[in-house]
Image (cartoon, rainbow, N blue to C red):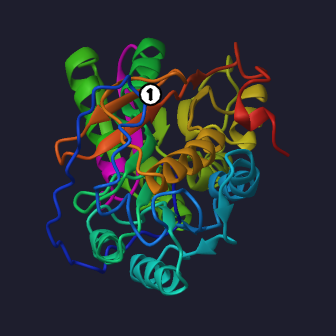
């Protein structure tokens, strides 16, 4: 997940709106051409014209800062008239207010990165009532209608971290610094990592820190955990954007930050693919990260909102951009974008988005 500093799910509205996914005879990523769907045939007449609102979860993480920088560039390249981004400041209730404000301004489409998988349904319901299509980025809503979810496979994040640590550490204790379990991203990564270790690496013992995407919480709880467990051999950080700096600082303060190859080195795997993680890999401070595609989130968020405004529909299957559209249990479609594992062997690959930003 991309991540955020605080995710306190204070909204509990769970109005049920099952998303109806229409099958069409065209190829995958080919429009059905129907404009009968309410979302596709709003006030814009289904022609793809009109302003698009873009709502961010936060701007305190380097990941979301990068995404925010990509938005205007990708909007221009995809021919989308995007308004200036709105920052919900890690507050799910503020995010619903932001959605309503954008709708009241007459936007014809919305690209939203939900803070809370359940709470976002209140905003999605408002958009549906106004006939405005929504594309969700990074987080899949539990309920509500969206034209597409643009996201990487977060289950694979947890599994990749597990496999890397499992191959490096024969036995011992590993720590999982988790995200907010109110978010499907936090749940997917946590459950996948836990299940993979149990199945494939039973000699590893997983200790868990529920940190809610909060850097201060991660630092404090890691400090306490290391006091009781100084023999930790590995760490999985679910969000490098908020956990990298406090984790490295905590280890350094305890004299436990050893470089790769040094005696006592703690193997660390992260998530996000931000430049700071790449620098840490090069320095031998951490070992790997899963690159969450901030650039592609922005690109395909714009691609799918334009398609939705034009009345286009999609169906499950491989895409032409090395991803796959899957149908979630809720009935929502999700384009699962590629998210490669980055280690010292490929950290300098110029194709990685983290190597293209300052």
Q: Taking 338 as reference, is 357 above or below it?
A: below
Does residue 183 belong to the magenta stretch?
A: yes
Q: Taking 325 as reference, is 49 above or below it?
A: below
Give percent across and percent down for residue 71. Answer: 68, 55
Does residue 293 belong to the magenta stretch?
A: no
Q: Nearer the viewer, residue 165 or 319?
A: 319
Mark 1 element type: helix
Q: What residue is disc 1 on? A: 161
User: Crowding at label 1, few (<14), some or many (≥20) Cα neighbours within 10 Å?
Assistant: many
Answer with left or right where residue 147 lies relative to residue 266.
left
Task: Please report the residue visible at 21 percent of the width from the left and 78 percent of the height from the top.
Answer: 13
Task: Please report the residue visible at 35 percent of the width from the left and 37 percent of the height from the top.
Answer: 32
Magenta part of the chain:
170-187
Q: Nearer the viewer, residue 348 or 259?
A: 348
Query: Toward which corner of the image does residue 198 lie, by quadrant?
Result: top left
Answer with left or right where residue 11 lies relative to residue 337.
left
Residue 146 makes an appearance in the image: yes
Q: Taking 6 as reference, is 61 above or below it?
A: above
Give percent across and percent down for residue 50. Answer: 59, 68
Give percent across and percent down for residue 176. Answer: 39, 42
Residue 232 makes an appearance in the image: no
Give percent across and percent down for residue 4. Answer: 52, 62
Answer with left or right where residue 180 lies relative to residue 355.
left
Task: Please report the residue visible at 22 percent of the width from the left and 60 percent of the height from the top.
Answer: 143
């Amino acid at each position: 997940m991309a991540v955020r500093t605080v995710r306190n799910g204070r909204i509990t509205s769970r109005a049920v709106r099952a998303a109806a996914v229409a099958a069409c005879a065209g190829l995958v990523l080919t429009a059905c051409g129907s404009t009968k769907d309410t979302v596709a045939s709003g006030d814009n007449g289904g022609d793809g014209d009109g302003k698009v609102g873009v709502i961010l979860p936060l701007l305190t993480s380097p990941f979301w800062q990068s995404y925010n920088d990509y938005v205007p560039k990708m909007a221009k390249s995809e021919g989308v008239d995007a308004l200036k981004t709105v920052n919900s400041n890690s507050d799910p209730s503020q995010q619903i207010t932001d959605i309503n404000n954008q709708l009241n301004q007459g936007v014809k489409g919305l690209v939203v990165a939900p803070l809370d998988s359940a709470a976002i349904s209140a905003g999605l319901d408002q958009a549906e009532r106004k006939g405005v299509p929504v594309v969700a980025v990074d987080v899949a809503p539990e309920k509500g209608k969206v034209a597409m979810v643009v996201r990487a496979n977060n289950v694979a994040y947890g599994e990749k971290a597990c496999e890397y640590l499992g191959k490096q550490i024969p036995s011992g204790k590993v720590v999982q610094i988790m995200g907010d379990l109110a978010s499907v991203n936090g749940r997917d990564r946590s459950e996948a990592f836990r299940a993979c270790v149990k199945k494939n690496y039973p000699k590893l013992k997983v200790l868990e820190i529920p940190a809610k995407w909060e850097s201060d919480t991660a630092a404090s709880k890691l400090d306490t955990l290391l006091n009781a467990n100084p023999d930790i051999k590995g760490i999985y950080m679910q969000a490098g954007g908020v956990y990298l700096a406090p984790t490295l600082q905590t280890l350094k303060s305890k004299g436990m930050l050893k470089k790769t190859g040094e005696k006592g080195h703690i193997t660390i795997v992260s998530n996000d693919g931000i430049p700071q993680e790449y620098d840490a890999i090069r320095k031998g401070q951490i070992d790997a990260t899963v690159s969450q595609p901030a650039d592609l989130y922005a690109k395909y968020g714009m691609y799918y909102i334009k398609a939705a405004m034009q009345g286009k529909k999609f169906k499950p299957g491989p895409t032409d951009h090395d991803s796959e559209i899957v149908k979630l249990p809720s009935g929502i479609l999700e384009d699962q974008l590629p998210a490669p594992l980055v280690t010292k062997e490929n950290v300098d690959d110029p194709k990685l988005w983290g190597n293209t930003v300052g």
